[in-house]
Amino acid sequence: MFSSSNVTCRVFERQIRSSPPGASVNRARKFYENLVPSHTLYDVECPDHCFRKFTEDGLFLISFSRNHQELVVYRPSWLTYTSDSDDTLPPLPRRASRFDSFFTQLYSVNLASANELICKDFFLYFPSRRFGLFATSTAQIHDSAPSPGAVPGVPSIDKITFVLLRLDDGVVLDERVFLHDFVNLAYNMGVFMYDDLVAILSLRYQKIHLLQIRDSGHLVDARAIGYFCREDDELFLNSNSQAMMMTTTQDKNKQQDREDDGENGLRHTQPNAENSFLSGIKQRLLSFIFREIWNEEPDNTMRVQSLKKKFYFHFQDYVDLIIWKVQFLDRHHLLIKFGSVDGGVGRNADHLPAFFAVYNMETTDIVAFYQNSAEDLYQLFEQFSDHFTVSSSSPFMNFVTSHSNSVHALEQLKYLKNKSNSFSQFVKKMLVSLPFSCQSQSPSPYFDQSLFRFDEKLISAADRHRQSSDNPIKFISRRKPETLKFKIKPGPECGSADGRSKKICSFLFHPHLPLAISIQQTLFMPPSVVNIHFRR
């Protein structure tokens, strides 16, 4: 797009040549090949906090206190100093190795009560109003007592509190409390945000709570999807249940009269309204599967045989499915992942069978259903992966590298596909990531694979801890002759003296500044080694 790699030539060229339609942002991101975090400050003096992430607009750095009681919010600034040296790169002042030279603390606010802790892996950002959604919870109970409507085998948490906070001043705007429930809060897995809508999945009670974030900062119940799908389902079933109770009472009275007259008869038990029906979402799923199998065969005899093999034989397996995860595809459709109870609460569910359903919230219908080895779903994932990853209309998140917007990512995916021994197993491995966790990728241009090449085993845009390496991570330009642009090295400058302890690291990249933080720590959580990488 630029004929030269020199930043001055690029500025002049931008003045005299206009970008192609729709390519102005991509052209501007090319400048990041010249603006890189080329300098590192090792083992910076900083507060002993758990640093979570930058907000996607880059205005705030979110962190939590070590006791997981307080939220601490910083505003990214920049190191400023004067020097009378004639050197091109004058020596940095002594205060440059301090954390507050790059970040200004805005406030600290207590979010958790005495018996609750802040979930340090959970945070969602509402960029249009600069609201942050946080979560606190009590300890998890694995052997919880059975509860009506609860899925057996799913643990319980006595109290989960979602807190909506205005990040500009730290004011708590609203809260939503879930009692004796279980929501998977790790890396936002159980909560998904799309524009002003929030979906919270209750694994324990198999209910999707849809909330709307108002401009005033209130969390408003929009609907709940699970046992009921429409707003009037509960009213209809309750009125029908009352009619059944009246009919049953009349039948019992008549039966008692006949018994009093010396006649023998059968006793009729009252159906339990809670256990008489499957949940609304499960009934719609079974209906869709039935109709799909029915429409496959035009002959009635073949239809019956096909239904026996594909539907009735697996009927109980379909009934036992629970919702694992959910995400918005748009404001009207949800992508829901179903599986067994073990996979819903286990850490490693890759080997377990799973299913995906697309649910229309307006019509309350299932419009598509796939197994996790379905090739047609994989083709959609490969060609339109942006539709799965983009969770909002925020411009900062529209340029995260994916298979559908990057030739290099697509080539890497095809390489893995050709390398795989079994295409079915490859499809299962790729579809494990669906549904995507909300706001789980960094929009930093340094993860743009059209600009830089790096080892994704050591670092990537995904919001995950990784095993630390003693060797620096290289970022190499995609532009010929593919020169080394900068390095990121976590941990001490001279390496760790203890090579036996297993170390993990995390990377926090600012979404649009040449600024990054690397945090290295051991599994036993001693004080972390924090490095700041920036451009001088």
Image (cartoon, rainbow, N blue to C red):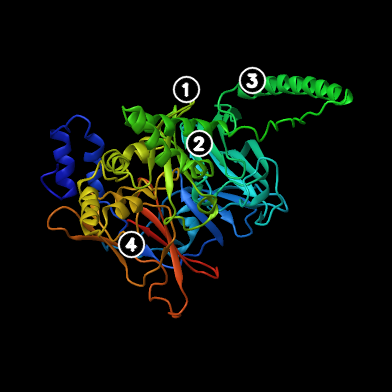
Please name the residue that numbered disc 2 is placed on.
130
Q: Secondary structure at mark 3?
A: helix
Q: Nearer the viewer, residue 523 or 515?
A: 523
Chain-order first, disc 1 or disc 2: 2
Please name the residue that numbered disc 1 is placed on.
363
Gap in angstroms between the C-alphas marked 3 and 4: 54 Å
Point out residue 176 in the picture as x, y percentages from the top left corner: 64, 37
Going by the numbered disc 2, the residue's amino acid type is Arg
Choose mark 2 or mark 3, whichever is in front.
3
Please name the residue that numbered disc 3 is placed on.
236
Chain-order first, disc 2 or disc 3: 2
Going by the numbered disc 4, the residue's amino acid type is Lys
Going by the numbered disc 1, the residue's amino acid type is Thr
Choose mark 4 or mark 1, whichever is in front.
1
How would you rate the neighbour count of disc 1 (Cα within 10 Å): few for under 14, some for 14-19, many for 20 or more? few
Judged left or right of residue 257, residue 282 is left
Q: Secondary structure at mark 2?
A: loop
Q: Quadrant of the N terminus?
A: top left
Judged left or right of residue 392, residue 453 is left
Gap in angstroms between the C-alphas marked 3 and 1: 17 Å
Please name the residue that numbered disc 4 is placed on.
457
Q: Quadrant of the C terminus?
A: bottom left
Judged left or right of residue 95, residue 253 is right
Chain-order first, disc 3 or disc 4: 3
